[in-house]
Amino acid sequence: MTTALHYYVVHDGVGEPEGLLVEEFLLAGDHSCVGLVGGGWSRSEGRWCDASATSRRLRVDPALRARVTPVSRTGAATLYQELCGAALPHEAVLRTCFGAPAVPPSPPLLLHGREATPGFRETRLYRILFAGALTPGGLTALGEAWQMPVTGDLADPGVRVLGPVRRRVGRDAFRWELRRIAAGAAWGLDVTCDLTGDRDDPVGVLLHGLTAQVRFQGLIPVTVDRFR
């Protein structure tokens, strides 16, 4: 399965835009992540090339994360036009420069039983994992976007859950928690999906939308794991 690409501006050592990084999470049929690929363009090279290794390094290198800024495709297109005087290639073209995933897909790590919440056909549990530091402004923005009551103090490293959210989409029910992981070294959204019908399209739409909202607050998505 495919989804819309993620775009980042890459800055040089003095903070000036140097290029673009474009990424895609490869998804299994249940919307969990099975790989990450990426492509990059820089002013110095003047061409698009495979940047999957850079995408993977971005998840573990704070210095590199400090040099990237999440942007929309529109923002990336504007910068690309300014830097090289051309239109940003279509996403199908950008994908042609992506390399193959470094690790072969593995089945989901289901740590819980498959029993559904009473009244629903199926219950799934996902964790969207993010690297980086969440700012007070970012927490406020997410709280407003999700109408999430902030139940924990961001400044207190002992607080694990910062806020819960509940939503209904038709007959399906969704709930998620914004959670500090590994003493703040990472952040996660634990998303529970209670499904009634045979179609799970709303799951993919929700996971993608949540990822995008958190990404625009400066955190870098790492993976989407399914535990149930």
Image (cartoon, rainbow, N blue to C red):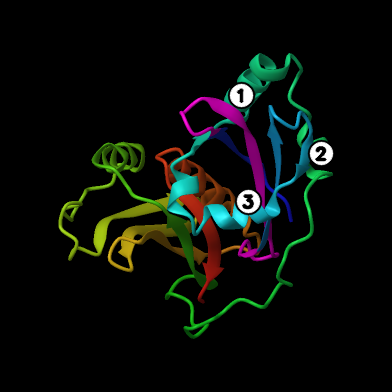
Marks 1 and 3 in Cβ contact (< 8 Å)? no
Percent position of residue 14, x then y: 46, 29
Disc 2 target residue: 92
- Residue in the picture at 69% in, 53% down: 52
Amino acid carrying label 2: it is Ala
Q: Vertically, is 177 above or below 119? A: above
Q: Of marks 1 and 2, which one's residue comes earlier in the chain?
A: 1
Amino acid carrying label 3: it is Thr
Percent position of residue 135, x then y: 28, 43
Span highlighted in magenta in the image: 11-34
Neighbour tally class for label 3: few under 14, some 14-19, many 20 plus, Cα within 10 Å: some
Marks 1 and 2 in Cβ contact (< 8 Å)? no
- Name the one closer to the observer, 125 or 6: 6
- Residue in the picture at 45% in, 38% down: 216
Identify the secondary structure beneath mark 1: helix
Separation of residues labelled 1 and 3 (CA atoms): 22 Å
Separation of residues labelled 1 and 2 (CA atoms): 16 Å
Amino acid carrying label 1: it is Thr
- Name the one closer to the observer, 185 or 16: 16
Neighbour tally class for label 1: few under 14, some 14-19, many 20 plus, Cα within 10 Å: few
Identify the secondary structure beneath mark 2: helix
Disc 3 target residue: 54
